[in-house]
Structure formats: C-alpha cells, structure tokens
Image (tube, helix red, strand yellow):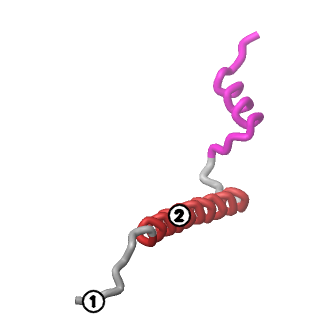
Amino acid sequence: MTVDRAKLRRVRIQAIGRRTGPEVRTSDVVLAVVGIALLAGLCLLGLANMVGEAQGVAGSFPVSTRTL
C-alpha cells in the first residue's frame, strides 16, 4: 500500500485549520483592530506617565517669585 505524501500533507493542513488562501475572516480584522487599540492605549499611558514624572521633577525645584 502506497501513500500519496502530497495528499496526506493537504489533509493534515486542513485538519489543523491552516488557511492556504488569502481569505480574511471578520475575527481576524476585529483582533487586529483591538490589538492596535490596546497598543495605542499603552503608548498613551506611557506618555502620560512620562509627562507626570517630568512635572513632578519640575515642581520640586524652588522657584523665585522675584523679578529682576
């Protein structure tokens, strides 16, 4: 009994759910949008943290109210 290796490979690929075509599923688009939104939120939180630390450092120095 001989086994066609190409046919066996196609069956295995289909069994594990790999897509061989360029089809895009709605869930893929939703996951991409959610991932980008989460990454953007993380960047904004990091920026807010950096600005807050910079204001804290600037506020800790004594400032003279006298003008020359």
**2 in the magenta segment:** yes
Choose between 38 and 45: the one closer to the eye: 45
* Residue drawn at point x = 65 percent, y = 55 percent: 23
* Residue drawn at point x = 66 percent, y = 62 percent: 34
Residue 29 in percent (x, y) is at 65, 61
Judged by its main secondary structure, the magenta piece is: helix
Choose between 18 and 7: the one closer to the eye: 18
Residue behind mark 1 = 67
Callout 2 amino acid: Asn
Residue behind mark 2 = 49
The boundaries of the magenta stretch are 1-20
* Residue drawn at point x = 27 percent, y = 89 percent: 67
| Quadrant the N terminus occupies | top right
Secondary structure category for the residue under label 1:
loop
Q: Which image quarter: residue 37?
A: bottom right
**Sequence-earlier tag: 1 or 2:** 2
Callout 1 amino acid: Thr
Q: Is residue 56 left or right of residue 10?
A: left
